[in-house]
Amino acid sequence: MAEVRQRKTPAAATEKQETDSSTTADVQAAEPEWSWSDYGSWPLSVRWAPAYVALIGVFIVVYYVTYVGDPGLDMSSTESCIATFNYTFRINAARHQAEQLSTHSWELGTAGEAIEELVDPQKTVFGRDPFPNDKIPSQGLHLDQALIWLYQKIRTTDQTLFDDDFAVSDPAALGAEENLLNEAPRYINGAISHRSEVAELWSDAVSMVPPFLAYYGVAMNDMNMIRTAFRQIQLYRDVLSINRGPKKGLWKHIVGPSELADEGCWSTGNGWAAYGMVRTRATISAWRPSSEVMTEEVKKLDQWVGEILDGAIETDDDESGLLRNYLGDDSWFGETSGTSLLTATAYRMAVLKPEVFGQQKYLSWADHKREAVIERVDDDGFAKPAVDPLKHSSRKPTESSPEGESFLLMMGAAWRDCVCAGVCPPPA
Ligand SMILES: *[C@@H]1O[C@H](CO)[C@@H](O)[C@H](O)[C@H]1NC(C)=O
């Protein structure tokens, strides 16, 4: 009795004023007379006890939500978490910049993917059920904002979805092409060239080609196409990955016969490779038929993404907190584009394979890189300094990188999905 009366005070005080006065009187009068076996004889304070307990519960929850966690964040479901998530930077401004600035094929494809991840995450390969009934999701009545935007930018009347004299793989960032599989030059090991003029491998191509081939394979119910996606990654890695020394695990940027060859570990290029592998991996593991027969391939992809992340962590020594434009080369400035994309990679892997990538080593690294990038996002949504995306070896950073803005969206969406999956800690 005493306990019940004591506990009711903090929470019940305001709401139960009316019952309070009568209760106190009742209890004193009724105390000697009531018995447990006769409900009718119970004083009101005893009858009300469960309500007090419930009120205290409500009070604790309200207190926690108000004073402890992010006040706006509603973690009661994935959807409510996504809807109430605070990205802590001007992500809508960044989205606007990505839409305005993107003109090249790969920029459009990357912006489309980034907007989809931001706005319609359940339809991407990172959603909870990307392939309902083993099929790609249909548009239905709700048209994706990313697709509406992209449809205005592409053509469907030629060999490629976009006019590009230079590259074969970049237009593939936008979608399916016969051109890619049958007409593009091949490197000596069979890897599809990034360029149309010469057989040349760029780490960039891993974000353009394999994720698309894998998704196309699901759409066409074609397991061979999905295997081709994996095989292409493997061929690229065979040529570009560095397997010893201080840059172990990182990928060279460009190997081939032209003057563009670049043995350095371009930060953005490593991001392209890693994030392309993550998207391919997520596609394979989300589609039931491929997940059943490609467990070894998924394991390898996890390992290969891990090699790049480990290499980035190992060479992460610039005082800006950003990754250098060329990883492991201390003559280079820290910049936001590669840092954002590799951070997005770490958050995605944390959800896909928490046993490994949910560890502090990766999570707190990703949080630090994210904070270093977000500190440098201005009121117009620009992250800078960013490498000049058209001149990766320029010592002069840019203030407005189209792909850099898309990477920012990908980082924001990947962080949000990691928090909402309960793997990353909620923002303080
Ligand atoms: C989002 O987080 C930032 C930084 O923690 C904070 O300054 C801002 O007020 C928050 N916005 C909202 C709408 O809660």
Image (cartoon, rainbow, N blue to C red):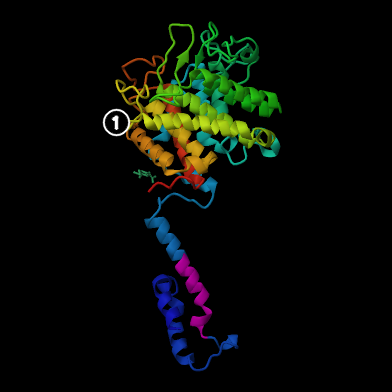
Where residue 275 sits: x, y (%)? 50, 29
Find residue 319 and report its image quarter.
top left
Q: Amino acid at mark 1?
A: Ser
Q: Element type at marker 1?
A: loop
Verify whether residue 46 appears in magenta: yes
Residue 172 part of the magenta segment: no
Q: Quadrant of residue 246?
A: top left
> Looking at the picture, does residue 293 appear above or below residue 197?
below
Image check: 190 left or right of 100? right
Neighbourhood count class around disc 1 (C-alpha, 10 Å): few under 14, some 14–19, many 20 upward: few
Provide residue 396's location: percent of width, then percent of height. 31, 17
Q: Residue at x 43, y 49 (%)?
A: 72
Between residue 35 and residue 255, name the one nearer to us.
255
**263 versus 273 height, above or below:** above
Q: Which residue is mark 1?
A: 320
Q: Position of residue 74 (x, y in %)?
A: 48, 51
SS assignment for the magenta stretch, majority: helix
Does any portion of residue 417 appear in the rendered image? no
Magenta part of the chain: 43-57
| Residue 338 visible to an observer of this rendering | yes
Q: Residue shown at 59%/11% (left/top)?
A: 186
Q: Position of residue 236 (x, y in %)?
A: 54, 19
